[in-house]
Amino acid sequence: MRFEGKVAIVTGAARGMGAAHVRGLAAEGARVAVCDVLDDEGESLAGELAHARYCHLDVTDEAQWRSVVRTVEDTLGPVDVLVNNAGIIHFGGVEEQSPEHFRRILDVNLVGAFLGMHTVLPGMRARGRGAVVNISSAAGLMGFADGIGYVASKWGVRGMTKAAALDMAGTGVRINSVHPGVIRTPMGESASPELFAQQPVARIGEPDEVTRMVLFLASDDASYTTGGEFPVDGGQTIGHVGHDHAADKA
Ligand code: NAP
């Protein structure tokens, strides 16, 4: 029970990987704030758990962040763990993507994670403890065609994680980034199997496989780890194996 007595905020938590992180944290004793814009799904998930509450939170809205953190501190307690998980994707290359979509992706994926840290870190600094896990992507470690905004946002999350980890040096607060590959969620399921057919572990990943990494980094097990980047991607970012695993098996 690594999170007994601890309080965690997870964004984009109503479904997909965020919901898996909520369940994992709760199973290990955390009181969890399930934050999302999908109110019905979020309420229903929080209702399944003993010590959770749903909070409507659009991560792009600074005032909502302040209000949610206040509510969480009043009802669940001071925040020990923040998982910046909310994210969106709009496909499009550098010539096709509209500036509006590009800006929207940065606003949710990058500015949203910044606002989370900006709001929560002063309390963690004051208490001398805390862990932030920023969900980037394999797209934060390499380039992808047709993903100009998404790739930019996820490289931003990776870089911002390192800058913030340095800013929090000596405070007892650690900040790391996680880089999922193709994962079975409403967002990941649309990916073509070709994306993972050439990777060392040639299959789609499961949300729980990412949750195990998130929980490690959020816990004291990772006490000597900050500013790091942690792929959970079946080896996608180290390169192609050179032949098609799926074809071998056929
Ligand atoms: P998902 O199933 O689409 O869940 C993301 C959740 O975030 C949804 O509930 C979504 O609500 C919510 N959200 C969107 N905009 C928000 C906002 N402004 N404020 C608060 N919540 C918001 O996605 P997922 O696959 O679990 O992805 C979770 C994270 O992992 C994301 O950061 C994603 O970029 C990253 N990731 C995913 C994959 C993959 O293959 N699945 C791979 C690498 C990285 P709506 O439905 O209203 O948008």
Image (cartoon, rainbow, N blue to C red):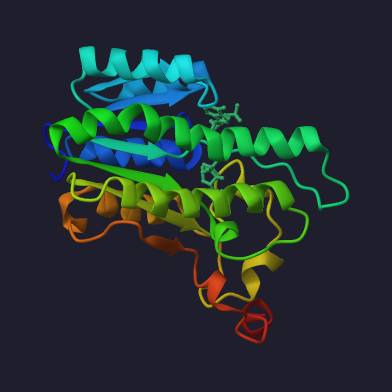
Q: Quarter for ligand 1?
A: top right
Name the quadrant containing residue 139.
bottom right
Quarter holding the C terminus is: bottom right
Q: Could one spot residue 31 in this view of the protein?
A: no
Count of numbered marks: 0
* Residue that sits furthest to the right in the current view: 95
Instruction: Give 200 or 174, whichever is nearer the viewer.
Output: 174
Residue at image x 16%, y 40%?
A: 129
Instruction: Give 249 or 236, whichever is nearer the viewer.
Output: 236
Give the answer, above or below, for where 229 lies relative to 238: above
Name the quadrant containing residue 248.
bottom right
In x, y percent, where is residue 106? 63, 39
Q: Is 31 displayed left or right of 139 in the figure? A: left
Q: Is 27 displayed left or right of 175 in the figure? A: left
Residue at image x 27%, y 30%?
A: 122
Residue at image x 32%, y 46%?
A: 167
Residue at image x 20%, y 49%?
A: 219
Give the answer, above or below, for where 26 lies relative to 199: above
